[in-house]
Each structure stands twice: as C-alpha cells, then as structure tokens.
Amino acid sequence: MAKAKSVKKAAPKKVKEKVVLAYSGGLDTSIIIPWLIENYDYEVIAMAGDVGQGEELAPLNKKAIKTGASKIFIEDLREEFITDYIFPTLKAGAIYEGKYLLGTSFARPIIAKRMVEIAKREGATAICHGCTGKGNDQVRFELTVKALAPELKIIAPWRIWNIKSREDAIDYATERNIPIPVTKKDNYSMDRNLWHLSHEGSDLEDPWNEPKYDKILKLMVTPEKAPNKATYVEIEFEKGIPVKIDGKKMKPIALMNFLNKVGGENGIGIVDMVENRLVGMKSRGVYETPGGTILYAAHRELELLCIDRDTLHYKDLVAQRYAELVYFGQWFHPLRESLSAFVDKTQETVSGTVRIKLYKGNCMPAGAKSPYSLYDEELSTFGEDAVYNQKDSEGFINLFGLPMKVNALMKKKNEKKDNNKK
C-alpha cells in the first residue's frame, strides 16, 4: 500500500498590526506614513479631526492613500469642539500667561479622544502622532491616550528617527516624491481651527523680529488696514454660553464663523508672545484669535455685572489653574473636571447681553444688561439717595482697618523702646 504524501500546511499569513496616525497632511505627518511602513511594517490608518481647518482637509483623503495609508477617517468634530472644549474654557475665563487663549491646547484632546475611539473600533494596537520632542502637543496627545486607553502603544517618530530638523523632513519628503505644504524658504509651522490660527518658526524664532503680519495673517487684517468706522456687536449669553448675535439665535459653528469674520475685518485678536512651554523652554508664537477675543471680552463684562465680588475673585484664581491644566494637556484630569463643575455653578446667573465696540484692533465694552445684574443704580449713584447711609462707612472702616492700626501701634511702641535703649 502506497504511503500517502504529507502535505505541508502553508504558514498562516502574518496579520499586520494597525496604528492610528493623527494626520494633518502637513510636513511631519506626510512623511510619517511611509516612515511607519518602512520601519514598523504597520498598517497605517490615518485620522484627521475636522476642528475647523477649512480647505486644508479637502486633499487629505487622496494624499493619505497615495502615501501608503490603508484608509483615512476625516471626522467632523467642529460642534463638539466648540460646545465641549471651547465653551467650558471660555466660561472659566482661562488665559495662559495672560495672553494665550489656548486655541491649539484644547484642540488636541478632542482629536486624541476620537483617535482612541477609532483605534478600538479598528483593532489597532498603537497610536502615532507627529509632534516634536520639544513641544507641548506631544504631552496633550499622549496624556489623553493614557487617560482613555492606557493599553495602547504610543509612537512618536520625532523622538526616535534620524530626522533632526524641518529641513531634514523636507529632504525626506522630496526623496520620496511626497507633496508637502512648505518649502525651506517659507517654513512657518501653522495650526488652524475654528478658534484660532497659530504661527511659529522661521523668522519668528528671534523675539526681536517684528512679525511680518502682511505675510502671515490669514484670518484677519492688521489694525492699520481695518475700517475707519467702528463696528458694534451685541452678544447674548445664557449661563455663560453665547447663543445670539445682534438678537439672532445662532448655532455654535455659525456663531464662531461670524465673530471670526467681523473680528478679523476689524483687526481684533492678534497676539505676539513668548510663552513658557511645559517641557521647560520658552517659545515665540503669533496667534490670530478674532472671534475668541471678542467672546472673552464680552463674557468678562457680563461676569462683572452678575457675579459677586468674592466668587469673582476666587474664580480668577481658578482661571489661572484651569489655563495651566488645559495648556499642559490635562483636559481629562480629575482636577480640570472638578474645576469645570465649580465654574458651571458660577455661571448660573451669567445671562444677558453685552454690546462690544470693535475699532482698529480694539475690543471695547459699550454696554451690558442682565436680569441677574447685581448693579444697583440707587446704591451706586453720586446723586442723592435714600437707601445708603454714608455715616455707616465710618464704623466699617474702623473695624476693617483695625488689624492695620494695631500693627502700626505695635511698631511704634517697639521703636520707642529701641530709642530708649540707645
């Protein structure tokens, strides 16, 4: 009887691991797709979060696939970005180092959150981003992943590859015929969303250089080119959230687009600053935040009208810490969430309308009203009134100043003793 021939079973085809890449189509992420394939043999899934980049998103689908991605998700996150990230920060009054309205800072957590959701759905084992090892964004992406999916691996090419500069990255792209949106001569790093547009790098790296505003501004004009006539805008808030412009109810995206347009036309919201990055170094950037600047100014005026002194002053302390948490990438930190709960309580009476005057880069209050106003004209008037006895202030000042008086008497007493010793 003939022996049956043994048949070798074909080795099972190795299934590639999947990685989800935060993809913008910019210089860094354009070269990361082929780099991941060459060095990790990963299946690369690109993900772009639409937080208001505008026309930048249109070519991404074709470009990502052409450079090696197996698929790309372009996720519309605009409304969620405004309602769940911008508005809470606005209500907090959070401004980093007195100037920066956190436009890039709170855009990263929402993108990273959606990346994690896609990674889980697609069975990916890793997340990848194109942030440099010198910047803040690497922290913002990675802390979000750690908070929401600590099991995922994180790949940060800028921390491990041989590319050391943007010029090296441009060379890498050129060698592989990868189209990129910058050149060695025009080498600004920009980030755009519904809230702002940031500019870094190139000649801005020297703080002594005045920004070339005519060259870099995209959302607005310089104050010198703004109209010679003032523009007035009325913004109505409900519990700290803007809901109407000039009496017309507007959804969040339309509201932001309108304010960006009118603010940009009047040269509102240019910020040039040297800031302290979380990683320890200082950096210089120029920010365009026309609509955001208007909203912050209007919201503050309404708070001054509707929030009592002690709560308002304490909220100002909270605002600084809140800004640090957002800037440091700790959006999903329990402290940030707890501070938001406090902020929401303070906003229960921040409802009303604020009129803002826009003129050549200036954003000035021109009136405010609210059913919850704590301003009492009868109490505050310089005219005659029957509700406030000015004699009462004498006793108040005596008691309020008593600790200072006691301290002064103590010093005087001890000075006398020292003089007697001499």
Image (cartoon, rainbow, N blue to C red):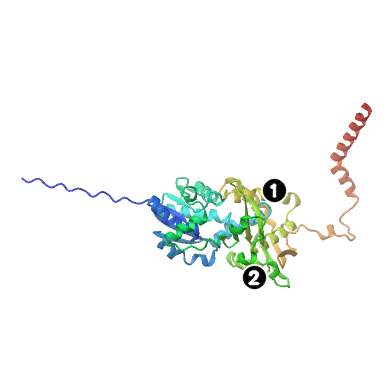
Q: Amino acid at mark 1?
A: Leu
| Dot label at residue 248 | 2
Q: Position of residue 390 (x, y in %)?
A: 90, 52
Residue sitting at the far left: 1
- Quadrant of the snapshot with the N terminus: top left
Residue drawn at (54%, 54%) of the image: 108
Q: Secondary structure at mark 2?
A: strand
Give the quadrant of residue 207: bottom right
Q: Position of residue 413 (x, y in %)?
A: 91, 32
Q: Position of residue 132 (x, y in %)?
A: 53, 51
Q: Which of the marked residues, 2 or 1, is nearer the chain's N terminus?
A: 2
Question: Could you classify mark 2 by the number of other residues whose Cα lies within 10 Å: few (under 14), some (14-19), or many (20 or more)?
Answer: few
Residue drawn at (70%, 72%) of the image: 227
Q: Nearer the viewer, residue 98 or 303?
A: 98
| Residue 239 can be seen, yes or no | no
Residue drawn at (87%, 46%) of the image: 397
| Dot label at residue 317 | 1
| Residue 346 can be seen, yes or no | yes
Q: In screen coordinates, is 12 left or right of 421?
A: left
Q: Position of residue 66 (x, y in %)?
A: 40, 63
Q: In screen coordinates, is 283 left or right of 127?
A: right
